Amino acid sequence: MSLLDSASHRRLNQLTGEWVLVSPHRTSRPWQGQVEKVRHADRPRYDPTCYLCPGNERANGERNQPYKGVFAFDNDFAALTSQASAQNVVHDGLLVALSEPGRCRVLCFSERHDLTLSRMSVAEIDPVIEAWREETMRLGALDMINYVQIFENRGAAMGASNPHPHCQIWATHSIPNEAVKESIRQSAYLERNGSCLLCDYLALELRRAERIVCRNDHFVALVPFWAIWPFETMVLPTRHIGAFDELAAEEASAFADILRRLTIRYDNLFETDFPYSMGFHQRPTDGAPHAGWHFHAHFYPPLLRSASVRKFMVGFEMLGEPQRDITPEAAAARLREVSEIHYLDRTV
């Protein structure tokens, strides 16, 4: 048993330069004991009260198209607007506020109210990935936009206000904090080593095979060495690409495959609609080359011991630094153990 398996230690997040405290001695098998399952009531294929279902009226009075497949529209309650005030505020260098124009979009994955990525086929997810690519390219081409952030909040536990399968796309003038940190670290690594940080990291993970969850010819899902959330994962392409617009056709389908397989594993872990916040980090659209940027996805799920036991960031984690008990290696092993056949599809 190594130090990483038994004693408290800190791990460096190479993408952000931040640390996480790991305390494996507190509980070596946090999933033992009663596993509480929460089976949500079956949702209908169409909900006449849902503001995202085809043909329904949204909160602002507009009516959705009678769409099939993906459907995108401007967010009715956008956090960013293209008409943001141009007034900046700076007082003594301490009170600083800057104008932030942008665009907010909503993208429905399917006309069906009862689906999630884990319940969709690869053929059904393919158009979602193509829509992500198109939205990235269209929004990123706007003069005022320098970053396109696509994210999905799944489940009420992660603040999702509607169970209809959908994600949000926020296109911002400024590059957001997390992307800035990752960009700085990736650029510095490239300058220092002459190679890509995440390419080298993925090669190391594939050699060690300790934290790999699943993979195919073009993508790998793994629990990062520096993971904060109990069953946090990262999805990486095996080829160095910077953003959605560089995905080849076969890579896009492989991406759909890996997202489906990973989200099925999440649902199967505690046999529930597994909540998470998921998003893609990709090359900024500010016109700079960003040669060191490696496209990837983050999954941040809050569940720890069962469908009803959540992990919260409190106390030391809010005032000091993030801390976890279950090691990333144990989390990866647990995710590898579960089936890729969705629990609702099992016949026995």
Image: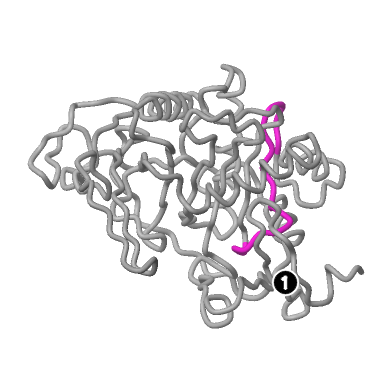
Residue 271 spot, x, y in % from top left? 53, 57
**Main SS class of the magenta portion in the image:** loop
Residue 216 sits inside the magenta stretch: yes
Task: Pick whichever, 198 or 38, lies toward us.
Answer: 198
Residue 114 found in image quarter? top left
Q: Residue at x 63, y 41 (%)?
A: 235
Q: Residue at x 83, y 68 (%)?
A: 4
Q: Is residue 10 above or below residue 242?
A: below
Q: Residue furthest front?
A: 92
Q: Mark 1 highlights which residue?
A: 22
Secondary structure under tag 1 reads strand
Which residues make up the magenta segment? 215-230
* For residue 261, side relative to residue 4 (left or right): left
Residue 329 spot, x, y in % from top left? 76, 59
Locate the N terminus and report the quarter of the image it occupies: bottom right
Task: Pick whichever, 323 or 188, lies toward us.
Answer: 188
* For residue 280, side relative to residue 185 (left or right): left
Residue 42 spot, x, y in % from top left? 35, 50
* For residue 317, side relative to residue 337 (left or right): left
Q: Residue at x 77, y 44 (%)?
A: 201
Q: Is residue 147 above or below residue 2?
A: above
User: Alpha-carbon neighbours of circle 1 within 10 Å: few (<14), some, or many (≥20)?
Assistant: many
